[in-house]
Amino acid sequence: MQVHPDPKPRKRLKNKKYLRDVANSPCLVSKEYAGQAHHLRHLSDCGMGLKPDDYFSIPLTPFFHDMAHNKPEEFLKLIGRLEIFGWIFHNLEAYAEDEGWDMSEIYELLVNCFIDWIATREG
């Protein structure tokens, strides 16, 4: 029997300008200047201990960024999953084009992550 190694891990998608613009957007919770981009680790396929792709980021103030990390269930009561994904979808397209990202692949990944997230949170 021939054993094949696991495929090479997908390269993490990065975009500093995207993260700066996310941080400079209004906070999804308070609607005030965010100042920080929060990477959504639980939505990404990056694995434990690895930073997610930059397109899995949302704008948060330091207060809500801290809450998202330390009190995630309380944070999710303040903002809905659909609002998070809606923000990501809305803001992603221009940056993806600049970076040459395959939007169909990104949309498929986001939709699958959203389905998995709903299933693990509700089931």
Image (cartoon, rainbow, N blue to C red):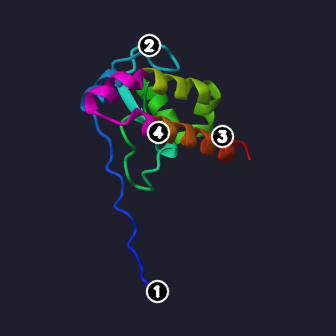
Q: Nearer the viewer, mark 4 or mark 2?
A: 4
Classify mark 3: residues with Cα within 10 Å, few (<14), some (14-19) or many (20+): few
Disc on the earlier residue, 3 or 2? 2
Q: Nearer the viewer, mark 3 or mark 4?
A: 3
Q: Which residue is mark 3?
A: 118
Question: In the rendered structure, which amino acid carries the disc numbered 1?
Answer: Met
The residue positioned 40% from the left and 44% from the top of the image is 52
Q: Nearer the viewer, mark 1 or mark 3?
A: 1
Disc on the earlier residue, 1 or 3? 1
The answer to whether residue 103 is left or right of residue 17 is: right
- Which residue sits furthest front? 1
Q: Evaluate if marks 2 and 1 touch, with contact meaning CB atoms under 8 Å apart.
A: no
Disc number for residue 32: 2
Disc number for residue 83: none
Residue bounds of the magenta highlight: 91-106
Per the model, the C-alpha gap separating discs 4 and 2 is 20 Å
Please determine whether, in this image, residue 106 is positioned above or below residue 24. Answer: below
User: Hey, which quadrant is residue 95 in on the image?
Assistant: top left
Per the model, the C-alpha gap separating discs 2 and 1 is 59 Å
Q: Which residue is mark 1?
A: 1
Q: Nearer the viewer, mark 2 or mark 1?
A: 1
The answer to whether residue 74 is left or right of residue 27 is: right
Secondary structure under the numbered disc 3 in the rendered image: helix
